[in-house]
Structures are given as structure tokens and as C-alpha cells.
Image (spheres, coloured by chain):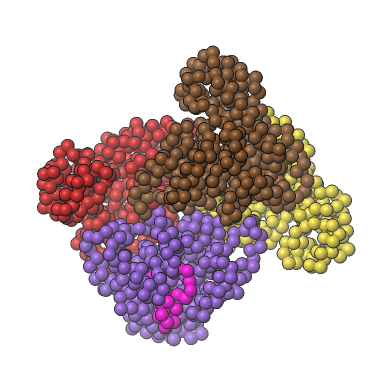
Chain colours: A yellow, B brown, C red, D purple
Amino acid sequence: MQFLSDNAARVHPKVWEALRSADEPDKPYDGDALSQQLDDVFSTLFGRECHAVWANTGTAANCLALATMADPHGGVICHREAHIEMDEGGAPGFFLHGAKLLLADGAGAKLTPDSIEAVLAAITRGIHQVQAHAISITQASEYGQSYTPAELAAIKALADEYGLALHMDGARFANAAAFLGCSAGQAAGPVDALSFGFTKNGALGAEVAVFFDPARADLARWRRKRAGHLNSKGRFIAAQILALLDGDLWLELARHANAAAAEIAAMAGERLLYAPQANEVFVRLTERERAALRARGFAFYDWDDATARFVCAWDTRMEDAAALARAVGSL
Amino acid sequence: MQFLSDNAARVHPKVWEALRSADEPDKPYDGDALSQQLDDVFSTLFGRECHAVWANTGTAANCLALATMADPHGGVICHREAHIEMDEGGAPGFFLHGAKLLLADGAGAKLTPDSIEAVLAAITRGIHQVQAHAISITQASEYGQSYTPAELAAIKALADEYGLALHMDGARFANAAAFLGCSAGQAAGPVDALSFGFTKNGALGAEVAVFFDPARADLARWRRKRAGHLNSKGRFIAAQILALLDGDLWLELARHANAAAAEIAAMAGERLLYAPQANEVFVRLTERERAALRARGFAFYDWDDATARFVCAWDTRMEDAAALARAVGSL
Amino acid sequence: MQFLSDNAARVHPKVWEALRSADEPDKPYDGDALSQQLDDVFSTLFGRECHAVWANTGTAANCLALATMADPHGGVICHREAHIEMDEGGAPGFFLHGAKLLLADGAGAKLTPDSIEAVLAAITRGIHQVQAHAISITQASEYGQSYTPAELAAIKALADEYGLALHMDGARFANAAAFLGCSAGQAAGPVDALSFGFTKNGALGAEVAVFFDPARADLARWRRKRAGHLNSKGRFIAAQILALLDGDLWLELARHANAAAAEIAAMAGERLLYAPQANEVFVRLTERERAALRARGFAFYDWDDATARFVCAWDTRMEDAAALARAVGSL
Amino acid sequence: MQFLSDNAARVHPKVWEALRSADEPDKPYDGDALSQQLDDVFSTLFGRECHAVWANTGTAANCLALATMADPHGGVICHREAHIEMDEGGAPGFFLHGAKLLLADGAGAKLTPDSIEAVLAAITRGIHQVQAHAISITQASEYGQSYTPAELAAIKALADEYGLALHMDGARFANAAAFLGCSAGQAAGPVDALSFGFTKNGALGAEVAVFFDPARADLARWRRKRAGHLNSKGRFIAAQILALLDGDLWLELARHANAAAAEIAAMAGERLLYAPQANEVFVRLTERERAALRARGFAFYDWDDATARFVCAWDTRMEDAAALARAVGSL
């Protein structure tokens, strides 16, 4: 029973279907009919003008978006446990040509206006210090916590005050939107660009940087080509995205993953690090307890010495989640 | 009848099969069982120790390989019509952190020891000029011309004399190997790394940088992650490659594409720019002649004002090639 | 008798005086009283609003200016013999984060609207090719040729048509202005930024990137710090510049160097590559002839196998120039 | 009475003399007779083979050295208050092409084997995280604290254990060496490269990256040119360095600055942040107390809300230091 990562999940049958249907000759790169639909489909979804730039990985989508926001001599404020800081092998330094991540604090790996202002307040040496050009938040966060529309608005107000662009890493945007129960537009709030992930939610490999401004999207397209992310058979990326957006399949799959996570969390009691607001559950467990769970067939990662992380996906069986919940509850 | 690009071709049924078979949970990134087989499979294929680093595009595979060969302050000698110079949106400048392409001449977009030495001889200003660190050749070249093992050996000897690394862009390596009728090892010759393309030859999207030295491969793996090319479901890239290598399917598909190209070339007579040594045919045609062909249902790109390029793929129907051959012959 | 380079010339006595006068504690970096005067002094000189960013070398001044004009994924059109292409060790690739130099032709190493348009016309592959973002011209050129105000206006018109920024490498701007006999403003024409050199014209080490737009200057200041060119005792750079601008000393020194060059050119007859329009003389001389001159005590560089380059400076003695002129004339 | 910065100090008369003496035509860049002496002079000074690469600023010298130690995808461990992190405007990100600074703790802005190991221990995610390639320490530190030879040896042992290169930022190396009372070689210990500063110690503008290995120096020379730090009249940088090394003037000047700092510290009592081990004194002072000192003519920077920083230089008058000491003592 696999709770290692939503990365390890299967590809959804509808995605397979869409892939096979896309296997007719069409224009290469993003000139095909499917890629050309994306701007409209996302515009409808978000309720404002969207420009969609697909890419192969979340790292690429994040960094292509951020590169439209921070100059090489600038910085991006993010949480010190954010994926771009911890897990992308220095990709922001590469795509942003040496720009710096400026690390902020916040419970549940969420930024707050206060934690952002603390970073800004420490930049006091003018030309001698890297200045913030942008803020990056993660929806849902590394600890599966989601920003409410009100929280997003407050961060955007601060960003505007300081003239900073606002980016959202949405590798698990679907899970956040499903948790919040609001529209995609509300779950994204007033951010300037969003990396919208599909790979963890039923795709084979498909991520999109969604821009709400054509100039940023134009810039990102040049950078995507230059980064080797303009696949020649791009229609196969677009096909996956369209299949998952169709009939709100993306939300349905995310709701399932969230429900499985909730099931586990319900039995974790005081051991729970955070009440899950997406598809991840962090549970305080000793080494011995983790070994016991593994012995019973549950696969998961140690988050740190005292914490296990369980990730549910669209294909997590509810009975497996229930079994894990019981096993955790009985520890 | 489509002769635009082998990029536009279909995905081979065996690749679809392999993709579906790979749809079981496994370790993410390149830790899965399929990715882990690649080093061995390529080592057998090339008859020497190989280290395979898959990527999403030929641009990425080329640049990841080149980044192990040229320092940011160095240069890479390539043909002035090479793909890395003309068609990769400046990706070498990005992946190599500002290293420079040093442009050489040569008929059929092939380099020769003489044309390479001409570039080296022009670098006379020491510290004030970018020095060559590597050579990049394309097998088959932009004009569908292949390097013989003897030609490869001669270039390698020159590279060694000057202490330069040697890279091969093998986006159409299969077509070159099929044309040469030699082993993969002979078609690659003594290069230090090879970008081996599968996307133009039946894959959905799968390219590999093959290194013959573990240190370069190790470096490329760090850089791949940092460039956002370490897909989380990497097993789907590995699966495609294994399917195409299995039973030498890659060679069979390339032979077909080459045969279709040969069919067209056979009727082009004096109009032929080069006798094809792969799957591309360049034919001198006036604007009016090209219009006439298009009116008869043939799709292809203008290479320049006086030349049409016809590209055959694994799925080009021989009857379509024959029809095009007749149409060209009758002009 | 030294005709190797104006780089090798002495420091002017007025510059020494200014350096010594600056040796009082003042604010570090560019906060000192002298640095603070530069914007005004250059604005008066050029007859339009100027923002001056000093640097240690012409390479730095050029690249700081260019970095405000071309994105990392863009290109800069320059002559194929331009200093930024031939003699700056790849600095544009470094400061511009991998942007590409797009090489154009033109007699005397001068660009023309036609030669620039030829480069633009060859960029036909859209997203797959590096697009031009800027043009860089050199006043005076590598062959000591100067652009007239009318030529500058024509290039600017073309730049505007294509939305390209226009940079002038003015390492020998003083010599061009002296030759043209026009104002500094006319010699710079309508360029967007100018690297104005003083080191070859009597300074110890002082170059300025002059911007005609505060946004570019602001950007360049951040980049200057980041490139390690914001000297802590910057007042000593500013002092040199102010000394050379005072009473148009810069023009007087350049006129002298130009006159010495003209003296040599006058005796070179048909051997002359170009009639000098600055302080450099290129003369066709066989290896034997060059050896003969060297045997008579003249030091100079071979430009190529068949050409000697003689460079005059502010401290070239007219009698030395006359002696060289006679020697050349007698060959 | 100026205690703002040793950056603001005057140029020593011997340096002026040397500059004037260097004002004879010689080979440009670093081909002149003075630059050519540096390797030998430093080799004698440090008692081991040295290769000296001068530059215009400490930022450049630091970053040129670090760029030989960390790949673009790697990291450099440094103190979170180190100059390269806090005061160089992101220069390491530029010169190292996006490499990351990995921040460590330590009293007095000094690293310890333990604080370095804590950083290394936190890098647990393999390919997904930036790995340390080098360590950078500052001699003397941002708080004017010096590493003893034993401390240097311990850090080097750790660096070797982990295969990390070791860099020393020696902007105030002279002050550290003077404090330690040991040889230059002992004060540098077994580091792989040292940025040796002269600008804060009597020069007009002269810094050197000293390498103990010719391969690193060779690399740094290419990078220096590419960064626009290869001044054409480089002899004037070399002249300053030689003047300050001659007869150990550098040590004499540093001893004076240290003595002035000690004078101030002696009266600061419990207010002292650290007992000075160089030429800087950090004193806890309220806003009101700082205002009182300023009202009496003392110029200095606020380090933070509760601390004043007083910096002494080679030209600080002992009577001024004594006056400041009395003033502080009387608060």
C-alpha cells in the first residue's frame, strides 16, 4: 500500500485515451490544435484572461514563471521549506541567472504578510544587497496547507505595496482548490502567475505555467524553448491537460485524494502535525512505529526523524487509506 | 501526404504498449526499474561502458552533454548550420552559462578536420578571445549527411591533438546508423558523448544523452535536475527507449524512413542538393514548382528560397513517397 | 617609439593632479562628491539628460550597457570584427547571461542599415532562433572609422523600426568626436547608451557607461555592484573623468592622437587600408617591411599577415610619428 | 573624526609613489613587469607556490576565487553574516552562475567545524538539493574576529573529509595577520585560495586572488577577463600591491589600525560585542548614546539598532581613537 508520493501514482484512463487520440500528425511544438486551445480553456476556468505555457515538470513551470518576475540581480521571497528552495536542485538559480531566494518563515510552510515583511525589513544595505523582486507561495504548501482567498488577497496587497510580483507554485493546486471548495479563480486569487500541476493528479507528465498577462507568457515562451522544454510533440502534453480539465476531472481526482488523506488524519489524533488541507498527512511517529507500519505493508517517506509523510493520490484505494488509518490509530 | 518533419510522425504501437506497461507505481525520477536498465542496454548496444541520462528534448540532451565539455568561458566548435546554432533558441548559451558557439564550414553541414582547424587557427588573441573547449558534430547532419567511421576517427584525432571534447548530436542517429550499415558503436565512433534521439523515430518524447565516462554522466545528472528535466514519472521516458531498442526496432524504423527518402531522391536527378544519407531529401525547386506539389497534396517545408525539404519518418507510407517521387520527377 | 596601443600610453598630468586632490576621505562607492557630479557634467556635455555609471574597463562599461538592452534569450547585432565579439573574452555572454552576438558585415568594421537588415532577414525560424534585441556600433570602429551623425540617424531609424535598442562602444569616442569636429552629442547621435572611454586617452583607468534614460542607468547600477565593479574608493575613478572633461581636455588629447595618426597615414599612400578617422592607421606591409620598421625602433602590432596597425595616443611625440611616416614612405 | 570605514581611508604615500613610478609605457593587461613579479613576491610571502590574480574589488577577487571551487549547480558554505552573503549584491550568484550560498552559524561570524557540519547534515535529498562544493571563511570576520592557525587546520580537515575546497575572504587579512602575530602563511593556513585585500589598507584600489595551485589561477584568469576585470593598465594595480608588500608595509599599517581599535575597545567595557582581533570595534550603544557621540564629531555606522561599528584604518590618528575611547568610556 503506497503512500510514498502522488508522483508515483498511475496515469488516469481518460489521460491514456486522450494521448492515443492525439496520435495523429499535427503541427509540432505548440502549434497543434490541442495546445492552441489551452489559453481559452484556462481563461474559462479562471474567469480571467489566461496564457498557458506547458512544460515537462513542475520545476520547469515554476522557474519559467519566476523568470518573468525577478531579474538576475533580484530575489524571490519564499518559505524556507518551499519546494523551489529545498527540492529543485538549484533550478531557480539556473533559470533566473543567479537570482536569490530570500527565505521567510511561517507555520505550515505558509507565508504571511508579517513573515514577508520581516524579510523585506532586513534588506537595509541598498545596492549592496539583493532586493526582493517577487514573492512565491505554494498552494497547497509543503505541509498540505492551503491559502484562503482572504489570505491570498492580503499577500497580494503587500506585494503591490512593495512592487513585487506574486507567484504561486501549484504543484498540488488541484488539492487546494478541492479543499477550499471554491472556484479555480478564487483558489489562485490575484497572483500574477501560477504553476498548475497535473502530473501528481493523473497525468503522465504535464505541467502548465498559467499567466494572467500576455507579456509574461510571451517571455516564458522564449525561455521555455531555450530551456529545452518546448517538446516537438507538444500535443501530447496539451492532450493530458485537456483531458484532466474536461468535466472537472482534475477536481474530482483531487477530492478523492484529499478524502483519503482526511481518512488517515482522522485517526492520527494528537500525532497530527497539521490538519490536512490537501492530500498529504504528516504524523509524528517514532522510528519504531514507522518500522511497525512498514512491516504491515505501508510504504511512505520519513519527513524527518520524528515524522512520517503519507501522500494520497487519485488512485489511492479508500480501503488502503482506511487500513492505514486504523494502523496509525492503533499505535 | 506529410513530409514536413519526422517530429510530426506518429508514436509506434510498440511504444504505446511499453508506455501502458510502465503504468504501475515505481520509484519516481530515474530510480525506477526501467531507467535503471538503460546503462546496461546502451553499454551492450555501443559495445563500451555507457551512462545514459534521459531528457525530454533533443535540445536538452544536446545541451546537458555539451555542458560537461565546455566551461562557461569556453566555446564549442560546430557547423554554422548546426541545430544547436540555428534552431535551439539559444539553449547552448543558457545551459553552458554563456559559452560561445564557434562556427565552422563544411559541405552538407558536416565538419572536417580542415574546417575545424580553420576555426582554431583564427583564435589568436589569447586571453582576449574565447577558446575552443569542445567540438560538436551532427550524425546525420542538417542536410541528412552521415559521417563515416573513418571521418569520425579523423575528427577525434584532431580533437585529441587540441585537447577538445567531442560531442555528437544524434537527433537522427538512427538514420545515420541505418544508412552506414554499421554498428551503433561504429556510427558513434570515438565521441565523448552522444545525444541519441528517439522522438523523431517513433517515440512520444524520449531523448538520451549517452556518456562513455561516468564523471560526465554524473555532472549531467545534477544539471538535468537543475534544468527541470528530471521528470517525476521518468519511467515513461525509459519505457519508450527500451521499446525502441528492443529487437533493434529503432534501426528497422530508420531503415524504412531512409528507404522512403531514397525513393524520392532517386527521381530528383540534378535537382538534388545532396544524395541522402539519412531520411531527408533536399531538392531545388522554384516557388512555382513547390506550389504545384502542394496543390497535389504534398506537405513540406521550404528550406530556403530555392529548396524544398522532404522528411520521411517511420510511418511514411512508401506509396506516398513513390507518389512524391513521381511528382518531383515530372516537374 | 611606441605605436602598440593607446592602452600603453601614460597618465596625463592633470589626471594625476585630480587623483591626488581626491585623496581625502569621502563617502565610499559612488556616494562621493565627485561621482555625484557626473550626471550633470555629462548632461551638459551631451546636451541631454545623462546618467553616468563608471566602471573599471571598457569591457565592463560595454557589457553593463548591453545588459540593459538584450534579455538573456536575445541577441545583439554587432560587426563581426567588433571588440565585444573579438576581444572581450566572452564577456557579453557572461554579463548578458548567454545572450548571443549576431554578426554583421560592413567595410571598415562599420555597420550599415543594409548590413544590419541582412542579419535580421536571416532570422526566420521564430521561437527556434535567437531574436535581435539590440544593435551595438563602435565609434570609432576597430579600423578607426567614424560614423557621421547622418549615419547614426539612419541606424537609429532602423533600430526603431525593429524595436531594437542601440548601443555605442565608445572606447575611442574621443577620437571619433575629434575627427568629426562636432559636439559630443552629435558624435553620439541618438544612441540609447554609450560606453565612453578615458583609459586610452590619458586616464589611469576610468570608463563610463552613459545612459540617456534613468531606468537603464538604475538597472546598470545594480549590475555593476553584482559584477564587482563598484569600487569602494570610486571617487578616484570619478576624479579622472572630471579632469579629462574639464576644459575639453579629452578632445584636445584626442585631436593630438588623431593628428599623429594623420601624419603617418599621409605617407602610406596606396598601402593605407582606410583613411584614418581617428587615431589608428592600418598599413599593408609585408613581413619583411614590418621587420625593417621594427629594426628601426618602431613598436607596433601585426593586425594580420599583411597589415600593420599603428596606434597613436595623447602622448605620442609628433616627431616620432613623423619619423614613422618617413620610414613607411621610404619602404 | 572618521570611523565609518577603512574603505574611506586615504591612499598611502608609498602607494602614490609607486603609482607614479609605474607611469611608463609597458605591456598592457597583466603582461607588464610589475604584474609579472607578483607570483614570486607572494610565493615568498606565503612560503609556498602562489599564483596571484589581481582585481579591482574584493567582491571580484572573492568571486573569481570561488568560481574555481563551486560548479554552477553547487553551493558554498559561508556564515550567514558573511560579506559574500550580505554585501556583494548577489555577486556570487553572478560569477558562479547561480550556485548557492549555504548559510552557517557561528559566534563572531566565524564558522566552526560543528557549524559547517550542521549545514552538511541538513543536505539529505540527494539530486534534489544543492550540494556543498566549497567553504568560505573570512579572515578577519565581519565582527573583526580572527581564525587561529589551529582553527584553520580544523576547518581544512573537515573540508578534506567532505571533498570541499576552502576559500578565505581576506579583505582584512592584513589586520588578522597583524593580530595573530604570525606569518602570512600561518594566517592563511591551508586554504586553497585567498582574496587578499589592499584597498582597505592604504591602496587606491587593489585586490588579489592568491591561488596555491596553478590550475585554479589559470581558470581565474579566463574568468577575470570575461568579467571585465583585466584592466588594460594593470601595472597600476600591481604597483600598489608591490608597494604595500615592500618591507612589510601592509603589516605595519594593519598594526596601526588594530592598535587604534584596541584603544577604543579598552574603554568600552561590558558594552563591547567582541574583543577586537582586527581593526573593527562593535559597541552596544543606544540611539541616544550614538547621537551624543555624533554630536561630538565622531562619524561611524550603526551596525544594528543597538550597536555601533567603529572601523580604524592605517591613517586613523591615535589621538582621535583616544578621544573616541574617552567619549565611549564616559557614556
User: Where residue B288 sits in the image (x, y, percent)?
Assistant: 49, 16
Is A32 above or below relative to D116? Answer: above
User: Where residue B151 sits in the image (x, y, percent)?
Assistant: 49, 39
Total numbered labels placed on residues in the image: 0
Is A217 above or below relative to C237? Answer: above
Q: Confirm whether residue D248 shows in the render.
A: yes
User: Where residue B131 sits in the image (x, y, percent)?
Assistant: 41, 50
Q: Tell which of D161 and C173 is nearer to you.
A: D161
Q: Residue at x 62, y 45 (%)?
A: B46
| Quarter placement of the N terminus of chain D | bottom left
| Quarter placement of the C terminus of chain D | bottom left
Q: Tell which of C266 and D280 is nearer to you.
A: C266
Q: Which residues are magenta?
A: D173-197
Q: Residue at x 66, y 46 (%)?
A: B44
Magenta-colored stretch includes residue D186: yes
Magenta-colored stretch includes residue A149: no
Q: Residue at x 48, y 82 (%)?
A: D275
Q: Tell which of B117 and B330 is nearer to you.
A: B117
Q: Residue at x 55, y 70 (%)?
A: D159
Q: Tell me: B14 left or right of C151.
A: right
User: Where residue C20 sits in the image (x, y, percent)?
Assistant: 25, 67
Q: Tell which of C329 and D323 is nearer to you.
A: C329
Is B112 above or below relative to A152? Answer: above
